[in-house]
């Protein structure tokens, strides 16, 4: 959920088969920062960060997914 002065909005999540959740919070935070830095609004940035964090749990280890891996996951 995103809460701002203008109101609240629910952000969809992605169901994945989680293998290892190590680092998912770090992936979320870094993906959020990258998207905000690129000029995306907060809600879009949170949607992407949720996606990146979810995809990061589908493999073993704390290294986050590359953009190509996130895009491939969305396509499949």
Image: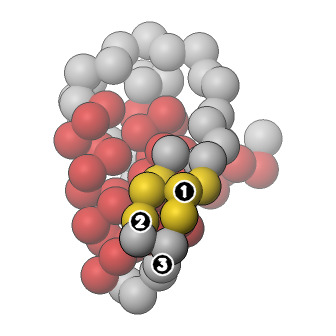
Left or right: where 8 falls relative to 14: left
- Residue 1 in view of the camera: yes
Is there a contact, CB below 8 Å, between mark 1 and mark 2? yes
Q: Nearer the viewer, residue 36 or 10?
A: 10
Query: Circle 1 sits on which residue?
Result: 8
Corner quadrant of residue 44:
bottom right
Q: Secondary structure at mark 1?
A: strand
Numbered disc 2: secondary structure: strand
In this rendering, which labeled residue sits more in front, label 1 or label 3? 1
Residue picked out by circle 2:
4
Numbered tag placed on residue 24 in the rendering: none
Quadrant location, the C terminus: top right
Side (left or right) of 68 relative to 66: right
Secondary structure beneath label 3? loop
Q: Tell me residue 3's x, y (percent).
A: 43, 56
Q: Residue at x 29, y 81 (%)?
A: 37
Look at the numbered discs 1 and 3 and tell me whether their residues touch, using CB distance below 8 Å.
Answer: no
- Left or right, residue 73 beside residue 57: right
Q: Nearer the viewer, residue 2 or 32?
A: 2
Residue 70 in sight here: no
At a point 64% along the width and 34% down the height, the residue shown is 14
Of the numbered discs 1 and 3, the one sitting upstream in the chain is 1
Residue 69 locus on image (x, y percent): 53, 49
- Determine whether 68 is above or below 54 in the image: below
- How much space separates mark 2 and mark 3, taking CA atoms? 12 Å
Residue ID at (42%, 25%): 57
Q: Earlier in the sequence, mark 2 or mark 3?
A: 2
């Amino acid at each position: 959920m995103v809460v701002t002065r203008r109101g609240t909005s629910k952000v969809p999540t992605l169901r994945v088969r989680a293998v290892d959740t190590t680092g998912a919070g770090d992936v979320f935070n870094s993906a959020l920062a990258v998207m905000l830095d690129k000029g995306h609004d907060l809600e879009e940035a949170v949607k992407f960060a949720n996606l990146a964090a979810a995809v990061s749990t589908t493999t073993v280890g704390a290294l986050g997914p590359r953009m190509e891996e996130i895009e491939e996951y969305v396509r499949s």
